Amino acid sequence: MATNYFYGTVLTGEAVAANNRGENIGNTTTLQKVFHQDDLHTSVSAEAIRFAIRYRFQLQGLRVNRTYDSGSGKLVYVDEKRTTWDPGGDVYVDDDLMGFMDAAAAAKEREEEDGDEGEEDADAAGAKGSGSKKGKQTAKPKVRGKTTKRPSPLAIGRAVSLRPYRGELSYNAVSGEKEKGKLSLYSAEMHTTEYQYSFGLNLGDVVDKRNIGHLVDAILDPPPVAGNHARFAYDFSPASIVLRLTQAHSSRIQNCFDHDEARRTYKVDRLLQRVESGDVAAGELIVAGELAATPAGARLRELGATVLPGIAVAGGEARARIAKLGGPFAAVAAPGAKG
């Protein structure tokens, strides 16, 4: 049976990104950075995006194993050890899509090995001090730890700024009455940019196919993505999106947006080249949002891609295509079904 994949690249709208807690250098709160195309760009971790998607499942009232208590800032599990995980029964949407790993047993194994090494060192020291030679000892049987895990069907890449970072900074002081010695002066790195990130989902590895639809909804309408944007309003929903339903094992649409500095916008030349060359089948693509109204969007339509003006409509089209795979995938067509 062929494996089907659902790939996507999201480009957010332009906004000012900043960090008001967490990482800092001296009294400067910093943005995470990566080198991309030989230039310095700001970045948002894949973990922050995954957290937001998982949190949306919770906000929608879906059946999740892990919930986030915003009051205490703690994570609460229904079944942290996954003792009730049963692929043949009801599964939690977050465990199903994002996988899990409980390495406690493996950690215990390591602790016991460390303990054995300590005993051997003590025995050696004692033998040396007494001047006696110890005979060969019988090795203790090792207790092998067991790791309970499920590989994640969903892979998400880091979000990378479309525009290079040019060192924008703001300078601030504590609010309220200013007292000498208590001004709390600090600066914050800022970046006016769009962000793009890519994801891939192995549809066959998802146990409850309804959860595929929940992921589509979360990608199109995520809650605030924290990480480097805490306490700042940065909309991480797609302004433009490229989706691909395929049996190809490689996405070939990852980070397909590039900054066009001359025109102060973006371009998708690499995507066009891959479609025109036949490396990406145009009929597998769904292109939506602001990109649809550009010359590149018109060209993709000519080549045979489905090009839509609205993001929500693209989500419906993606659901419909996945549902046409038949069998259990038919459950993906209807939005709102709770898993």
Image (cartoon, rainbow, N blue to C red):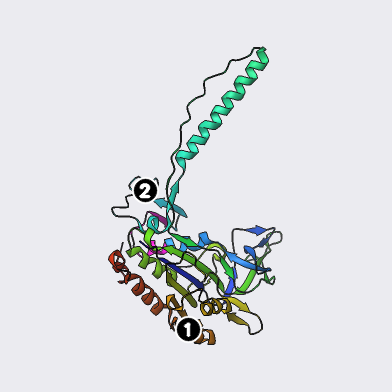
Q: Which residues are magenta?
A: 55-68
Q: In which quadrant is the N terminus drawn?
A: bottom left
- Circle 1 sits on which residue? 303
Which of pointers 1 and 2 indicates the residue nearer the eye?
A: 1
Residue 193 sits in which quadrant? bottom right
Q: Residue visible at 55% across and 73% down?
A: 256
Residue 194 sits in which quadrant? bottom right
Specify the label residue 79 is tagged with.
Answer: 2
State the residue in front, 323 or 72: 323
Q: Earlier in the sequence, mark 1 or mark 2?
A: 2
Q: In which quadrant is the C terminus drawn?
A: bottom left
Q: What is the count of numbered marks?
A: 2
State the residue in front, 151 or 20: 151
Q: Is residue 179 above or below residue 193?
A: above
Q: Is residue 126 left or right of residue 62?
A: right
Does the magenta portion include 191? Answer: no
Image coords of residue 265 (percent x, y): 60, 82
Specify the label residue 12 is tagged with.
Answer: none
Q: Is residue 175 visible?
A: no
Q: Amino acid at mark 2?
A: Asp
Q: Amino acid at mark 1?
A: Leu
